[in-house]
Image (spheres, rainbow, N blue to C red):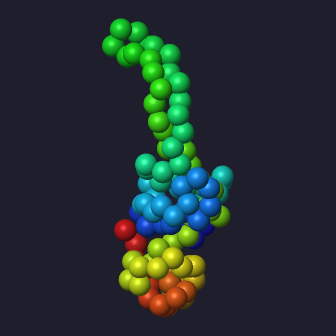
Amino acid sequence: MKIKKGDKILITRGKDRGKNGNVEKIFPKEGRVLIPGLNLFKKHLKPQGEGKPGGIIEISRPIDVSNVVLICPKCNQPTRVGYQLLGKEKLRICKKCQSPIEKK
């Protein structure tokens, strides 16, 4: 998976198309990423006792990685990710400006 935790991404498909955010968690087996505040769904909760009333809450659900694109931190444009070997180190690079994408 070419998207990592902490990357700034842009959503390209779905109800939140055009919005951007930072990746909070990745799910590599499912091929999904979680972006807080985006892809919100409502969930109905039953009361769990006196201290916890029921109600309708909004939760963020993971979105498929094919529906997001990385935003390059240097050129600030949506881009694809490439790889470059530098000695024994493998770097992610921006396909538009060829600059390395730093780890966060």
The image shows residue 21, relative to residue 34, as above or below, that is below
Position of residue 81 in the picture relative to residue 52 (left or right): right
Position of residue 15 in the picture relative to residue 6 (left or right): right
Which quadrant holds the C terminus?
A: bottom left
In the picture as drawn, the residue positioned furthest to the left comes out as 51
| Foreground residue among 28 and 34 | 34
- Counting labels gives 0
In the picture as drawn, the residue positioned furthest to the top comes out as 50
Q: Can residue 6 be seen from the camera position used here?
A: yes
Q: Can residue 90 be seen from the camera position used here?
A: no
| Foreground residue among 102 and 73 | 73
Q: Position of residue 92 (x, y in %)?
A: 51, 80
Which quadrant holds the N terminus?
A: bottom right
Q: Position of residue 56 (x, y in %)?
A: 47, 26
The image shows residue 88, relative to residue 58, as above or below, that is below
| Foreground residue among 29 and 19 | 19
Say which residue appears at 33% left-offset and 13% top-offset. 51
Q: Position of residue 33 (x, y in %)?
A: 55, 55
Say which residue appears at 38% left-offset and 83% top-offset. 74
Q: Position of residue 42 (x, y in %)?
A: 53, 34
Say which residue appears at 53% left-offset and 24% top-offset. 44
Say which residue appears at 58% left-offset and 53% top-offset. 15
The image shows residue 13, relative to residue 46, as above or below, that is below
